[in-house]
Image: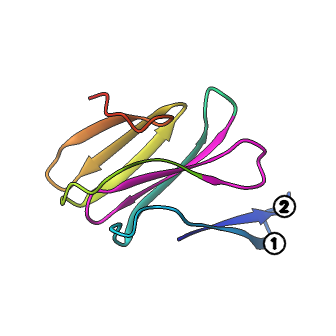
Amino acid sequence: AVLAFHHDRAHSTFAMHQALTGPPKEFSPATALAGTVGTDGRGRIARADANGGLCVWITADGKSFEPGPSALASGTCCTGVCIRGNILASTYSTGEIRIHDAQTGAMRA
């Protein structure tokens, strides 16, 4: 699970808001997290794991997240993830870079 927090305007007080669950049981420990607001105005949080799996959570109302697209593990450690607009980029321990559509999970490159 990934924990989402709220904070006050001064960033001095944080409170847990929601535990994000939903990726397949095969997902291993998280290695990277990233967040953005998509071109459709919906917030997204992306999670990568040690076996190469990716999962995106989406919020339409800014208050609660729902599981979005995911990519099953490739067996190679995902060392970094970046989500910008509707593009999800991931890097792997082999040096490979993959580009996915953050709305559908489809691989673009």
Residue at 60% across, 33% down: 38
* Residue 35: mark: none
User: Which amino acid does the dot numbered 1 rest on?
Assistant: Thr
Image position, residue 54 (x, y; %): 38, 53
Image position, residue 94 (x, y; %): 13, 52
Which secondary structure lies at badge 1? loop
Residue 8 vs residue 85, the one in the foreground? 85
Residue 67 vs residue 5, the one in the foreground? 67
Tell me how far mark 1 sits from mark 2, CA to CA.
8 Å
Quarter of the view holding residue 85: top right
Residue at 81% across, 72% down: 13
Up the image or down, 17 lies above or below 89; here it is below
* Membership of 68 in magenta stretch: no
User: Which amino acid does the dot numbered 2 rest on?
Assistant: Ala
Q: How crowded is mark 1: few (under 14 residues within 10 Å), some or many (20 or more)?
A: few
Image position, residue 106 (x, y; %): 36, 34
Please tell me whether mark 1 or mark 2 is closer to you in this view.
Answer: 1
In this rendering, would 33 be left or right of 65? left
In this rendering, would 100 be left or right of 104? left
Image position, residue 99 (x, y; %): 33, 34
* Residue 13: mark: 1
Residue at 28% across, 47% down: 91
Colour basis: rainbow
Up the image or down, 15 lies above or below 79; here it is below
Q: Residues within 10 Å of mark 2 (few under 14, many from 20)?
A: few
Up the image or down, 5 lies above or below 95; here it is below
Q: Give the range drawn in magenta.
A: 42-66
Quarter of the image that includes the C terminus: top left
Q: Name the residue under label 2.
A: 10
Which secondary structure lies at badge 2? loop
Q: Contact (CB < 8 A) between labels 1 and 2?
A: yes
Up the image or down, 100 lies above or below 53; here it is above
